[in-house]
Amino acid sequence: MTTASSSGVPRRYMLVAFALALLAGSLWSLLRPSPPPEPPADTSLYARLGGQAAEKTLTFVERGGSVLVIEPRLHGHAAPAMEAMIRAYESALRKAGVSIAARERVTLPGPANEVREEPWTLSAMREKHPNAAAIASFAGPPVQPVARGERPPMLVFCAEPVDARALLRRGEAEVVIAPRPPEGTTPGEASDAYAMFTVGDPQ
């Protein structure tokens, strides 16, 4: 005996129709055309910035020397623009006869509700790589800076606005790359969006 629903349609037919609807929906999700992938970010401008940073580094590192590179990571991943900039930086140094002592990866602090790692320190990096002739931190300035004369020459890249000239005056770096004020920015130009400050520049 077939059980009928209140509308008079046998229940088994309703279950079959429901199953067919689910199957059709699953097939549509598999066969429908997927949206086009987003175009990759243009990292060539950041690569150019990395080359310019290498030129500055070569003013205080002689051929045959080595540079310790500090790379920032967020959630374990490197941003494509940052990776392009560091690769170009390292490539330019190698072409000039300067080697890379190491590329140390440090994790940037995340939101307050996430587990935070201890911030990297300059003293710890120097202990690991005592023979590096210079340090290039693309992770910003260290939380415990070391004064000029007590450390190798240092280049610091800051992704966020910072008082670059103050860092130079305090002797925390020889070169600082930092965002320009908004009025001095050319839209879409990474190298123009950042300014390079060097010890000895006019204030």
Image (spheres, grey):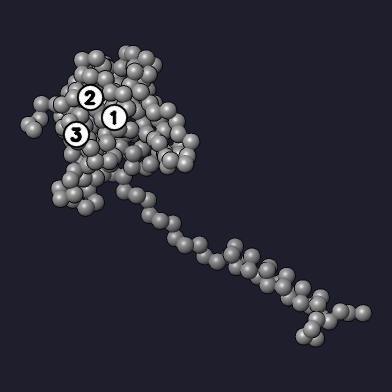
Three-letter residue code for mark 1: Pro
Q: Residue drawn 81% across and 77% down? A: 11
Q: Earlier in the sequence, mark 2 or mark 3?
A: 3
Three-letter residue code for mark 3: Ala
Residue underneath mark 2: 172
Task: Kindly tell me whether residue 110 is visible in this rendering.
Answer: yes
* Left or right side of 181 for 68: right
Assign a secondary structure to mark 1: loop
- Gap in Å between the C-alphas at discs 3 and 1? 10 Å
* Left or right side of 99 for 27: right
Query: Which residue extends farthest front?
Result: 112
- Gap in Å between the C-alphas at discs 1 and 2? 8 Å
For residue 198, which quarter of the picture? top left
How many residues crowd mark 3 within 10 Å: few (<14), some (14–19), many (20+)? Answer: many
Q: Residue drawn 44% across and 57% down? A: 37
How many residues crowd mark 1 within 10 Å: few (<14), some (14–19), many (20+)? Answer: many
Task: Kindly tell me whether residue 101 is visible in this rendering.
Answer: no
Assign a secondary structure to mark 3: helix
Query: Which residue extends farthest bottom?
Result: 8
Three-letter residue code for mark 2: Glu
Q: Residue drawn 38% across and 26% down? A: 120
| Disc 1 and disc 2 in contact, CB within 8 angstroms | yes
Residue underneath mark 1: 141
For residue 181, which quarter of the picture? top left
